[in-house]
Amino acid sequence: MDNLPLIHIGKFSSLLICLLLTLSACSILGGEPGEATPTPMPTSSVPGLQVIMPQACLVAEQGMIRLENPQGDLISWSPAANTLAYVASTQGSSWNVGELNILTAPLFDNPQRLASQVAGELAWSPNASTIAYLGLRRSDTLYTIGLAYPDERPSKDLFPGEAARTDGFSSQKAIFEWIDDGRLWVYVSCGIDCMQRMDIAITTGLSTPKGNPIQRNWELWSVHTDHPMNITSEYTDLAGQLNWSPDESQIAYVNEDGYVWVINVGTGNLFPLDIGVYGTATETDWSYDGQYLAVHVDQNLKIFSFNCP
Protein backbone atom coordinates (compact mmCIF):
# COMPACT_ATOMS: atom_id res chain seq x y z
CA MET A 1 0.00 0.00 0.00
CA ASP A 2 2.89 2.37 0.71
CA ASN A 3 4.06 2.07 -2.94
CA LEU A 4 0.78 3.22 -4.54
CA PRO A 5 1.41 6.97 -4.22
CA LEU A 6 4.79 6.51 -5.91
CA ILE A 7 3.12 4.74 -8.86
CA HIS A 8 0.58 7.56 -9.27
CA ILE A 9 3.33 10.16 -9.10
CA GLY A 10 5.30 8.30 -11.78
CA LYS A 11 2.34 8.19 -14.15
CA PHE A 12 1.62 11.88 -13.58
CA SER A 13 5.25 12.77 -14.30
CA SER A 14 5.19 10.79 -17.55
CA LEU A 15 2.04 12.54 -18.73
CA LEU A 16 3.50 15.92 -17.84
CA ILE A 17 6.68 15.20 -19.79
CA CYS A 18 4.66 14.10 -22.87
CA LEU A 19 2.57 17.27 -22.70
CA LEU A 20 5.67 19.46 -22.49
CA LEU A 21 7.23 17.67 -25.45
CA THR A 22 4.07 18.17 -27.51
CA LEU A 23 3.95 21.88 -26.75
CA SER A 24 7.63 22.21 -27.59
CA ALA A 25 7.08 20.51 -30.93
CA CYS A 26 4.28 22.95 -31.76
CA SER A 27 6.56 25.87 -30.92
CA ILE A 28 9.34 24.49 -33.09
CA LEU A 29 6.96 24.05 -36.03
CA GLY A 30 5.76 27.62 -35.62
CA GLY A 31 2.13 26.85 -34.84
CA GLU A 32 -0.18 27.05 -31.89
CA PRO A 33 -2.07 24.10 -30.44
CA GLY A 34 -5.33 23.67 -32.37
CA GLU A 35 -4.30 26.09 -35.14
CA ALA A 36 -5.31 24.95 -38.67
CA THR A 37 -2.53 24.30 -41.15
CA PRO A 38 -2.60 27.05 -43.80
CA THR A 39 -3.35 26.01 -47.38
CA PRO A 40 -0.16 26.31 -49.42
CA MET A 41 -0.09 28.59 -52.46
CA PRO A 42 -0.10 26.68 -55.76
CA THR A 43 3.18 26.42 -57.57
CA SER A 44 3.75 27.91 -61.00
CA SER A 45 5.59 26.45 -63.95
CA VAL A 46 6.61 29.93 -65.12
CA PRO A 47 10.30 30.43 -64.30
CA GLY A 48 11.47 33.62 -62.65
CA LEU A 49 8.04 34.87 -61.57
CA GLN A 50 6.85 35.09 -57.97
CA VAL A 51 3.47 33.69 -56.97
CA ILE A 52 1.37 36.11 -54.90
CA MET A 53 -2.08 35.97 -53.35
CA PRO A 54 -4.98 36.15 -55.84
CA GLN A 55 -5.95 39.68 -56.86
CA ALA A 56 -9.23 38.83 -58.64
CA CYS A 57 -12.64 37.67 -57.47
CA LEU A 58 -15.35 35.64 -59.17
CA VAL A 59 -18.41 37.82 -59.78
CA ALA A 60 -20.59 35.72 -62.11
CA GLU A 61 -20.99 32.24 -63.53
CA GLN A 62 -23.21 30.87 -66.31
CA GLY A 63 -23.61 27.58 -68.17
CA MET A 64 -22.15 27.13 -71.65
CA ILE A 65 -22.15 24.54 -74.41
CA ARG A 66 -19.75 21.60 -74.67
CA LEU A 67 -17.63 21.05 -77.76
CA GLU A 68 -16.31 18.08 -79.69
CA ASN A 69 -14.08 20.22 -81.96
CA PRO A 70 -12.90 23.85 -81.94
CA GLN A 71 -15.61 26.37 -82.84
CA GLY A 72 -13.77 29.65 -82.41
CA ASP A 73 -14.58 32.22 -79.75
CA LEU A 74 -17.45 31.23 -77.46
CA ILE A 75 -16.97 34.31 -75.26
CA SER A 76 -16.42 37.86 -76.53
CA TRP A 77 -16.50 41.27 -74.84
CA SER A 78 -17.95 44.33 -76.52
CA PRO A 79 -15.21 46.68 -77.76
CA ALA A 80 -17.04 49.65 -76.23
CA ALA A 81 -18.69 48.50 -72.98
CA ASN A 82 -18.52 45.88 -70.25
CA THR A 83 -21.01 43.67 -72.05
CA LEU A 84 -20.10 40.05 -72.68
CA ALA A 85 -21.48 37.77 -75.39
CA TYR A 86 -21.32 34.01 -74.88
CA VAL A 87 -22.83 30.79 -76.22
CA ALA A 88 -25.11 29.41 -73.53
CA SER A 89 -26.36 25.87 -73.18
CA THR A 90 -30.07 25.21 -73.65
CA GLN A 91 -32.51 22.91 -71.90
CA GLY A 92 -32.70 20.66 -74.94
CA SER A 93 -28.98 20.22 -75.50
CA SER A 94 -25.61 21.35 -74.20
CA TRP A 95 -23.51 20.00 -77.09
CA ASN A 96 -22.05 22.09 -79.95
CA VAL A 97 -25.01 24.45 -80.45
CA GLY A 98 -26.67 26.85 -78.03
CA GLU A 99 -28.04 30.35 -77.61
CA LEU A 100 -26.23 33.65 -78.01
CA ASN A 101 -26.66 35.60 -74.78
CA ILE A 102 -25.18 38.82 -73.47
CA LEU A 103 -24.46 39.88 -69.88
CA THR A 104 -23.82 43.41 -68.65
CA ALA A 105 -21.74 44.72 -65.74
CA PRO A 106 -21.75 45.10 -62.84
CA LEU A 107 -24.07 42.26 -61.79
CA PHE A 108 -23.99 40.03 -64.89
CA ASP A 109 -27.14 38.41 -63.54
CA ASN A 110 -29.75 38.82 -66.29
CA PRO A 111 -28.80 37.05 -69.55
CA GLN A 112 -30.32 38.64 -72.64
CA ARG A 113 -30.99 36.16 -75.45
CA LEU A 114 -30.15 37.42 -78.94
CA ALA A 115 -30.13 34.34 -81.19
CA SER A 116 -30.55 30.57 -81.23
CA GLN A 117 -28.76 27.74 -83.08
CA VAL A 118 -25.38 29.39 -82.42
CA ALA A 119 -22.16 27.37 -82.64
CA GLY A 120 -19.45 29.95 -81.90
CA GLU A 121 -17.05 32.27 -83.76
CA LEU A 122 -18.40 35.32 -81.91
CA ALA A 123 -17.14 38.62 -83.32
CA TRP A 124 -18.33 42.14 -82.45
CA SER A 125 -18.38 44.83 -85.12
CA PRO A 126 -16.00 47.77 -84.47
CA ASN A 127 -18.85 50.04 -83.32
CA ALA A 128 -20.29 47.27 -81.08
CA SER A 129 -23.68 47.40 -82.80
CA THR A 130 -23.57 43.87 -84.24
CA ILE A 131 -22.31 40.43 -83.24
CA ALA A 132 -21.42 38.02 -86.04
CA TYR A 133 -21.56 34.32 -85.22
CA LEU A 134 -21.28 30.85 -86.69
CA GLY A 135 -24.67 29.18 -86.77
CA LEU A 136 -25.77 25.60 -87.33
CA ARG A 137 -29.36 25.35 -88.51
CA ARG A 138 -31.17 22.33 -87.11
CA SER A 139 -33.69 22.33 -89.97
CA ASP A 140 -31.14 21.37 -92.64
CA THR A 141 -27.92 20.85 -90.59
CA LEU A 142 -26.13 23.52 -92.63
CA TYR A 143 -23.61 25.97 -91.21
CA THR A 144 -24.29 29.64 -91.77
CA ILE A 145 -23.12 33.06 -90.60
CA GLY A 146 -25.60 35.06 -88.57
CA LEU A 147 -25.81 38.59 -87.24
CA ALA A 148 -27.29 39.45 -83.85
CA TYR A 149 -28.04 42.87 -82.41
CA PRO A 150 -27.77 43.92 -78.75
CA ASP A 151 -30.59 46.42 -79.34
CA GLU A 152 -32.87 43.38 -79.84
CA ARG A 153 -33.46 43.74 -83.57
CA PRO A 154 -34.20 40.34 -85.16
CA SER A 155 -31.11 38.31 -86.00
CA LYS A 156 -30.10 38.00 -89.67
CA ASP A 157 -28.92 34.97 -91.66
CA LEU A 158 -26.26 35.88 -94.24
CA PHE A 159 -26.66 32.50 -95.99
CA PRO A 160 -30.42 31.85 -96.00
CA GLY A 161 -31.83 28.61 -97.36
CA GLU A 162 -29.72 26.78 -99.93
CA ALA A 163 -27.23 29.65 -100.07
CA ALA A 164 -25.59 28.01 -97.05
CA ARG A 165 -24.75 24.92 -99.14
CA THR A 166 -21.54 26.36 -100.56
CA ASP A 167 -20.33 23.08 -102.07
CA GLY A 168 -21.45 19.50 -102.55
CA PHE A 169 -19.52 18.13 -99.59
CA SER A 170 -20.02 20.38 -96.57
CA SER A 171 -21.18 23.80 -95.49
CA GLN A 172 -18.38 24.76 -93.12
CA LYS A 173 -17.79 28.42 -92.44
CA ALA A 174 -15.49 30.55 -90.30
CA ILE A 175 -15.39 34.24 -89.46
CA PHE A 176 -12.12 35.92 -90.37
CA GLU A 177 -12.63 39.53 -89.28
CA TRP A 178 -14.69 42.68 -89.58
CA ILE A 179 -13.20 45.07 -92.15
CA ASP A 180 -15.45 47.89 -91.00
CA ASP A 181 -18.96 48.18 -89.60
CA GLY A 182 -20.47 47.29 -92.96
CA ARG A 183 -18.15 44.56 -94.25
CA LEU A 184 -17.29 41.14 -92.90
CA TRP A 185 -14.70 38.65 -94.17
CA VAL A 186 -15.62 35.00 -93.76
CA TYR A 187 -14.37 31.66 -95.05
CA VAL A 188 -16.79 29.26 -96.74
CA SER A 189 -16.26 25.68 -97.85
CA CYS A 190 -15.49 25.26 -101.55
CA GLY A 191 -14.83 21.53 -101.84
CA ILE A 192 -12.99 18.79 -99.98
CA ASP A 193 -10.64 20.51 -97.51
CA CYS A 194 -11.14 23.76 -99.43
CA MET A 195 -12.05 27.14 -97.92
CA GLN A 196 -12.61 30.38 -99.83
CA ARG A 197 -12.49 33.84 -98.24
CA MET A 198 -15.50 36.01 -99.00
CA ASP A 199 -16.07 39.75 -98.55
CA ILE A 200 -19.70 40.23 -97.46
CA ALA A 201 -21.51 43.57 -97.54
CA ILE A 202 -23.72 43.47 -94.46
CA THR A 203 -26.46 45.76 -95.74
CA THR A 204 -26.98 44.16 -99.16
CA GLY A 205 -25.75 40.64 -98.42
CA LEU A 206 -23.63 40.63 -101.56
CA SER A 207 -20.45 38.55 -101.32
CA THR A 208 -17.23 38.72 -103.33
CA PRO A 209 -14.41 36.14 -103.34
CA LYS A 210 -11.09 37.43 -102.00
CA GLY A 211 -7.79 35.77 -102.90
CA ASN A 212 -7.20 32.12 -103.66
CA PRO A 213 -8.78 29.18 -101.82
CA ILE A 214 -6.84 27.71 -98.91
CA GLN A 215 -6.71 24.26 -97.37
CA ARG A 216 -9.07 23.74 -94.46
CA ASN A 217 -7.37 23.51 -91.07
CA TRP A 218 -8.51 23.81 -87.46
CA GLU A 219 -6.63 27.09 -87.03
CA LEU A 220 -9.57 28.76 -88.76
CA TRP A 221 -11.62 28.01 -85.64
CA SER A 222 -8.99 28.77 -83.00
CA VAL A 223 -9.82 31.19 -80.18
CA HIS A 224 -8.69 34.79 -80.52
CA THR A 225 -5.96 36.16 -78.26
CA ASP A 226 -4.25 39.56 -78.14
CA HIS A 227 -0.48 40.01 -78.26
CA PRO A 228 1.86 43.00 -78.35
CA MET A 229 3.90 43.64 -81.47
CA ASN A 230 7.04 42.38 -79.75
CA ILE A 231 6.85 39.58 -77.19
CA THR A 232 9.74 39.51 -74.72
CA SER A 233 11.87 36.40 -74.39
CA GLU A 234 10.50 35.28 -71.01
CA TYR A 235 7.10 34.61 -72.61
CA THR A 236 7.99 33.29 -76.06
CA ASP A 237 8.81 29.80 -74.80
CA LEU A 238 5.83 29.38 -72.48
CA ALA A 239 3.67 26.40 -73.44
CA GLY A 240 0.01 27.30 -73.35
CA GLN A 241 -2.26 30.21 -74.24
CA LEU A 242 -1.19 33.81 -73.59
CA ASN A 243 -3.70 36.65 -73.82
CA TRP A 244 -2.61 40.23 -73.09
CA SER A 245 -4.95 42.79 -71.50
CA PRO A 246 -5.87 45.86 -73.60
CA ASP A 247 -3.19 48.02 -71.95
CA GLU A 248 -0.69 45.11 -72.10
CA SER A 249 -0.05 45.36 -68.35
CA GLN A 250 -1.40 41.87 -67.57
CA ILE A 251 -1.46 38.48 -69.25
CA ALA A 252 -4.06 35.76 -68.86
CA TYR A 253 -2.03 32.58 -69.12
CA VAL A 254 -3.67 29.17 -69.59
CA ASN A 255 -1.01 26.55 -69.00
CA GLU A 256 -0.84 23.06 -70.47
CA ASP A 257 -2.95 21.70 -67.61
CA GLY A 258 -5.78 24.13 -68.36
CA TYR A 259 -5.20 26.21 -65.24
CA VAL A 260 -5.34 30.02 -65.43
CA TRP A 261 -2.73 32.42 -64.10
CA VAL A 262 -2.67 36.21 -64.32
CA ILE A 263 0.79 37.68 -64.88
CA ASN A 264 1.60 41.28 -63.97
CA VAL A 265 4.06 42.32 -66.67
CA GLY A 266 5.49 45.23 -64.68
CA THR A 267 6.18 43.48 -61.37
CA GLY A 268 6.87 39.97 -62.61
CA ASN A 269 4.33 38.56 -60.15
CA LEU A 270 1.56 36.13 -60.99
CA PHE A 271 -1.43 34.67 -59.22
CA PRO A 272 -3.90 31.86 -59.92
CA LEU A 273 -7.58 32.24 -60.74
CA ASP A 274 -9.92 30.00 -58.78
CA ILE A 275 -11.58 28.08 -61.61
CA GLY A 276 -12.23 25.00 -59.49
CA VAL A 277 -10.03 22.10 -58.48
CA TYR A 278 -10.88 20.00 -61.53
CA GLY A 279 -11.63 22.83 -63.97
CA THR A 280 -9.94 23.03 -67.37
CA ALA A 281 -9.90 26.41 -69.11
CA THR A 282 -9.86 26.68 -72.90
CA GLU A 283 -10.44 30.39 -73.54
CA THR A 284 -9.99 33.79 -71.90
CA ASP A 285 -11.14 37.25 -72.94
CA TRP A 286 -10.46 40.67 -71.40
CA SER A 287 -13.05 43.43 -71.17
CA TYR A 288 -12.23 46.55 -73.16
CA ASP A 289 -11.02 48.40 -70.03
CA GLY A 290 -9.23 45.43 -68.44
CA GLN A 291 -11.53 45.49 -65.41
CA TYR A 292 -12.94 42.02 -66.07
CA LEU A 293 -11.64 38.72 -67.38
CA ALA A 294 -14.00 36.09 -68.78
CA VAL A 295 -12.89 32.46 -68.76
CA HIS A 296 -14.45 29.45 -70.48
CA VAL A 297 -14.00 26.52 -68.09
CA ASP A 298 -15.43 23.17 -69.20
CA GLN A 299 -19.18 23.88 -69.49
CA ASN A 300 -19.11 27.15 -67.60
CA LEU A 301 -18.48 30.83 -68.10
CA LYS A 302 -16.68 32.47 -65.19
CA ILE A 303 -16.28 36.25 -64.95
CA PHE A 304 -13.58 37.66 -62.67
CA SER A 305 -13.25 41.25 -61.49
CA PHE A 306 -10.00 42.98 -60.57
CA ASN A 307 -11.80 45.49 -58.34
CA CYS A 308 -12.53 43.22 -55.40
CA PRO A 309 -14.19 44.51 -52.21
Image: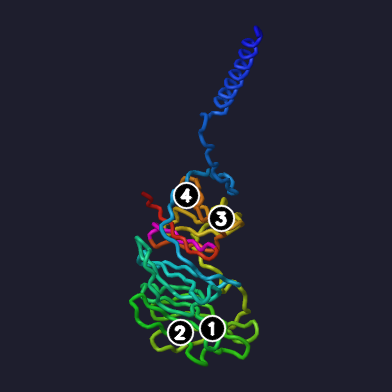
In the rendered structure, find residue 259 and report the number of the disc placed on it. Answer: 3
Q: Nearer the viewer, mark 2 or mark 1?
A: 1
**What residue lies at 37% left-to-right and 52% top-to-bottom?**
307
Query: Which amino acid lies under the numbered mark 4 shown in the image of this protein?
Result: Asn
Question: Alpha-carbon distance for marks 4 and 3?
Answer: 17 Å
Check the image and report above or below for 130 versus 227: below
Residue 123 appears left or right of 241: left
Q: Which residue is mark 2?
A: 200
Residue nearest the observer in this picture, 247 or 146: 146
Of the numbered discs 3 and 1, the one sitting upstream in the chain is 1
Q: How is the image coloured?
A: rainbow
* Precedes in sequence: disc 3 or disc 2: 2
Would you name the residue on which mark 4 appears?
A: 264
Q: Nearer the viewer, mark 1 or mark 4?
A: 1
User: Closer to the camera, 86 or 232?
Assistant: 86
Q: Are marks 1 and 4 in contact (CB under 8 Å)?
A: no
Instruction: Give percent across and percent down for residue 258.
Output: 58, 58
Frontmost of labels 3 and 2 is 3
Q: Quadrant of residue 71?
A: bottom right
Crowding around mark 4 (Cα neighbors within 10 Å: few <14, some 14 to 19, many 20+) is some
Gap in angstroms between the C-alphas marked 3 and 1: 32 Å
- Magenta extent: 289-297
